[in-house]
């Protein structure tokens, strides 16, 4: 192995990272204009100073930042006054991500972040590299670390020429975000606050309204930008997802590592036949709610039929082919409203469990992915001869629970789910007296 | 009520027989024919009883200090002492029952762990899913000659621990479980 060359980041990097300077300067300009009126000369001079300072500092920082990738480690030296030398062992790399903030996208640049702990927090970042170089470096690092090129983000891969399996229409996307139970109830709460404003004072009412509009609006906009242009394509490793307007993220959901999916149907979505699908993928655990949502969402919104087709491709089994059975009606005292949603079904390949009235969730788990189960029975359930079965899966959004089943059925379910016995076989508890 | 297991396709809701008709009783749920449950050692109850008594002693001491220093503290102590004694008696009984409820059963393909009296729970862990097996014992546990075996799978939901085993039994169980886990490893 020849000595690896020492390299620098892309020369445009300081300009992109200098955006902060510009924002600070704009703030100063606005403030200054309020105090002493707009003065072209002052603005020009200060702008020149800021630009110069930014350029000098940025260029110096760029000059002193170097990285080198050799067989065992990647080394990043940085810092103008305080020098910092960071070494990341390649074999310890958990994830290498290529990201493109929107400004970088204009220049065809990308940011490479290295994560060693598997926590999703970057150990080191290289910002910015030409996009192609970043992708190439990522492939190199993943090769050397011996990790498969799988669930990590990587915008713009050759998969883009593959046929689109599903594309979220912009209108439906917006409507689905507005009709989410949390959003609707927040808007409703704000409306009540405004309606009460004669009682609590007009100023407070206006403040409530303003706060609500800003909060709800920013949530809506952020979500919309995140999911805009959502598409799913099929690749050899699994489904490739791409979405985002300003900063594009894309990832592959590797079919073989899917531990389960969950169809989530908020109350208002059910009227329209819409559903969201989240997925648990082994080895993908990340910090940060937004990020977790991105990683775990298979589809932000789709019709039931479209969602079912995608899940069918991912699990190699059709969840709609499973017939579900209701919990016994004697469970009504324990869950008067939700009883009709407590449904469970099994096939040779899948376990399907549904629950929830306001937001209905249908957890679908490949039976060979179930880690363990437990059967539990509280005193009330005991009196009604009911029991619940919980499935245990790796960390993720899927939480399959069969609530309030007949206790014999629950026990058979538990054994069938953990064993390799066919579900039609005799139950292990057959010798206990049955009440028939 | 529910027919044979093949009835997953049909609705199983319907008229259910009265409780008296259910000859097996509630215990059926936690009986596995042909697999004897192994109960944990009574030392587990002894350990927890000791902790309970230690708690009672602390409460009594606090009450005594209150009675001696605060005005009307005697009234507080007079009310608090019987309450503490009653609570301790109740706790004593609950600990006895709970400790007696812990048991495990090694089957061909999976391990059962049961626990609880009012809220009962049976954990079913296939050997092939086990990632690792821990044996832990703290200073108090050591004095009572017991250890805890803890099974981990790839799921944080798995809560498979068996407290109150003798250290030798715990070590043997761990070795057996590990061997079976290797033989049947399934992975993710």
Image: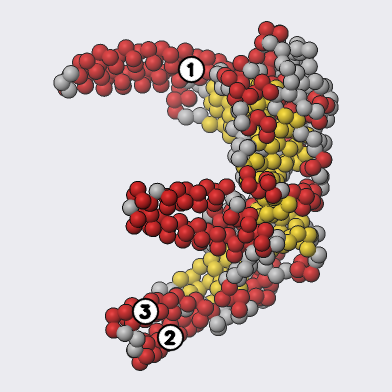
Against A119, residue B34 (above or below) is above
Q: CA distance from mark 1 to mark 2?
A: 73 Å
In front of the other: label 1 or label 2?
Answer: 2
Which residue in the structure is indicated by mark 2?
Answer: A51
- Quadrant assignment, res A122: bottom right
Dot 2 crowding, Cα within 10 Å, few <14, some 14–19, many 20+ = some
Do tags 3 and 2 sit on the same chain? Answer: yes
Chain letter belonging to callout 3: A
Residue pictured at 64% horizontal, 64% vertical = A228
- Quadrant assignment, res B165: top right
- Quadrant assignment, res A74: bottom right
Residue pictured at 25% horizontal, 13% vertical = B78
Which residue in the structure is indicated by mark 1?
Answer: B95
In front of the other: label 3 or label 2?
Answer: 3
Chain letter belonging to callout 2: A
Q: Of helix, strand and loop, which one carries label 2?
A: helix
């Amino acid at each position: 192995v020849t000595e690896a060359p020492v390299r620098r980041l892309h020369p445009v990097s300081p300009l992109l990272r200098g955006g902060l300077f510009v924002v600070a300067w704009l703030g100063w300009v606005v403030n200054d204009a309020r105090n002493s009126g707009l003065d072209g000369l002052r603005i020009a001079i200060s702008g020149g100073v800021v630009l110069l300072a930014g350029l000098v500092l940025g260029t110096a920082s760029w000059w002193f930042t170097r990285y080198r990738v050799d067989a065992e480690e990647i080394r990043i030296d940085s810092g103008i006054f305080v020098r910092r030398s960071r070494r990341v062992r390649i074999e310890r790399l958990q994830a290498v991500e290529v990201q493109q903030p929107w400004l970088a996208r204009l220049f065809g640049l990308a940011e490479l972040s290295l994560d060693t702990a598997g926590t999703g927090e970057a150990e080191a970042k290289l910002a910015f590299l030409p996009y192609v170089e970043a992708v190439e470096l990522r492939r190199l690092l993943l090769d050397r670390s011996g990790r498969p090129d799988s669930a990590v983000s990587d915008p713009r891969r050759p998969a883009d020429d593959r046929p689109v399996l599903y594309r979220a229409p912009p209108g439906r996307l917006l409507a689905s975000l507005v009709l989410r139970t949390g959003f609707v109830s927040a808007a409703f709460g704000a409306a009540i606050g405004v309606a009460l404003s004669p009682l609590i004072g007009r100023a407070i009412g206006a403040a409530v309204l303003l706060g609500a509009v800003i909060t709800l609006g920013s949530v809506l906009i952020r979500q919309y930008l995140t999911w805009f242009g959502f598409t799913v394509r099929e690749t050899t490793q699994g489904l490739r997802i791409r979405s985002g307007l300003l900063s594009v993220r894309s990832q592959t959901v590797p079919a073989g590592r899917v531990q389960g999916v969950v169809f989530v149907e908020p109350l208002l979505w059910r009227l329209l036949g819409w559903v969201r699908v989240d997925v648990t993928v082994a080895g993908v655990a990340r910090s940060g709610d937004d990020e977790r949502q991105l990683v775990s969402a298979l589809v932000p919104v789709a019709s039931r039929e479209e969602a079912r087709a995608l899940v069918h491709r991912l699990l190699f089994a059709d969840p709609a082919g499973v017939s579900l059975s209701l919990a016994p009606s004697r469970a009504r005292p324990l869950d008067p409203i939700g009883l009709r949603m407590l449904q469970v079904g099994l096939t040779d390949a899948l376990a399907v469990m549904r629950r929830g009235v306001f937001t209905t969730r249908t957890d679908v788990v490949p039976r060979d992915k179930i880690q363990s189960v437990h059967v539990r029975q509280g005193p009330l359930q005991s009196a009604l001869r009911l029991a619940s079965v919980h499935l245990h899966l790796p960390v993720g959004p899927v939480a399959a629970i069969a609530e309030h089943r007949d206790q014999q059925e629950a026990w058979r379910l538990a054994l069938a789910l953990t064993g390799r016995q066919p579900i039609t076989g005799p139950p292990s508890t057959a010798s206990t007296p049955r009440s028939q | 009520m529910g027919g044979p297991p093949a009835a997953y396709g049909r609705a199983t809701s319907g008229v259910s027989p009265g409780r008296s008709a259910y000859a097996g009783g509630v215990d059926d749920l936690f009986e596995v024919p042909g697999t004897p449950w192994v109960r944990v050692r009574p030392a587990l109850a002894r350990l927890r009883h000791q902790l309970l008594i230690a708690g009672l002693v602390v409460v009594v001491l606090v009450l005594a200090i209150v009675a001696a220093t605060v005005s009307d503290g005697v009234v507080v102590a007079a009310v608090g002492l019987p309450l503490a004694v009653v609570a301790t008696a109740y706790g004593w009984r609950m600990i006895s029952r709970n400790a007696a409820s812990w048991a495990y059963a090694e089957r061909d393909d999976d391990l059962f762990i049961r626990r609880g009296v009012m809220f009962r729970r049976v954990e079913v862990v296939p050997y092939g899913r086990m990632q690792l097996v821990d044996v832990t014992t703290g200073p108090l546990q050591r004095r009572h000659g017991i250890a805890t075996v803890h099974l981990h799978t790839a799921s944080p939901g798995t809560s498979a621990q068996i407290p109150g085993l003798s250290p030798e039994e715990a070590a043997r169980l761990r070795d057996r479980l590990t061997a079976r886990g290797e033989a049947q490893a399934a992975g993710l």
